[in-house]
Amino acid sequence: MFWEMKPLWRDDLQVRQVGDELVILDRRSGLIHQLNGTARYIWNRCDGNAGVEEIASSLAEEYGLIWECSRQDVEAAIGKFGELGLLMAEQPR
């Protein structure tokens, strides 16, 4: 699963900040995704450098959350990003 590795977004997505939201254009699926502040924070850390534990810790610190709640949010968001096909299935070696 994605939370067992360091999640990495697909490099062919078009990503833009629009106001308080992050907009992701996935030309492969023909869909546009809008992320709120928390989802944007998690998305920006899906750069292949941090695992779920690290992302959850930084989210908890940034927003003053309980770590377990933060981990659940991160797992849910990364799981959804994976379901939508926005993450790389395998990380480049």
Image (cartoon, rainbow, N blue to C red):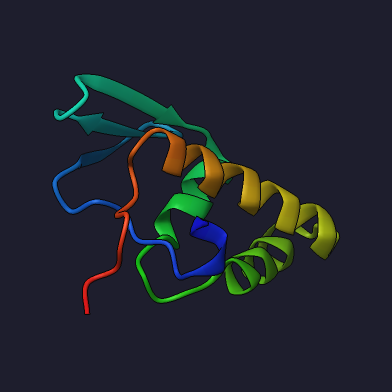
Q: Where is residue 48 shown, x and y percent of the image?
A: 36, 70
Q: Where is the C terminus found, in terms of image quarters?
A: bottom left
Q: Residue at x 22, y 30 (%)?
A: 25
Indicate whether 21 appears above or below 63. above
Q: Residue at x 29, y 34 (%)?
A: 24
Q: Nearer the viewer, residue 55 or 21?
A: 55
Question: Left of 52 or right of it: where is 10?
Answer: left
Q: Residue at x 72, y 58 (%)?
A: 71
Question: Left of 4 or right of it: where is 44?
Answer: left
Res 6 quadrant in image: bottom left
Q: Where is residue 22 shown, x and y percent of the image?
A: 38, 37
Give the farthest residue toward the bottom.
93
Res 30 quadrant in image: top left
Q: Nearer the viewer, residue 59 or 54?
A: 54
Indicate whether 40 appears above or below 34. below
Question: Left of 35 or right of it: where is 61?
Answer: right
Q: Where is residue 2 shown, x and y percent of the image?
A: 49, 57
Question: Left of 30 or right of it: where is 45?
Answer: right
Q: Residue at x 65, y 71 (%)?
A: 53
Indicate whether 23 appears above or below 48. above
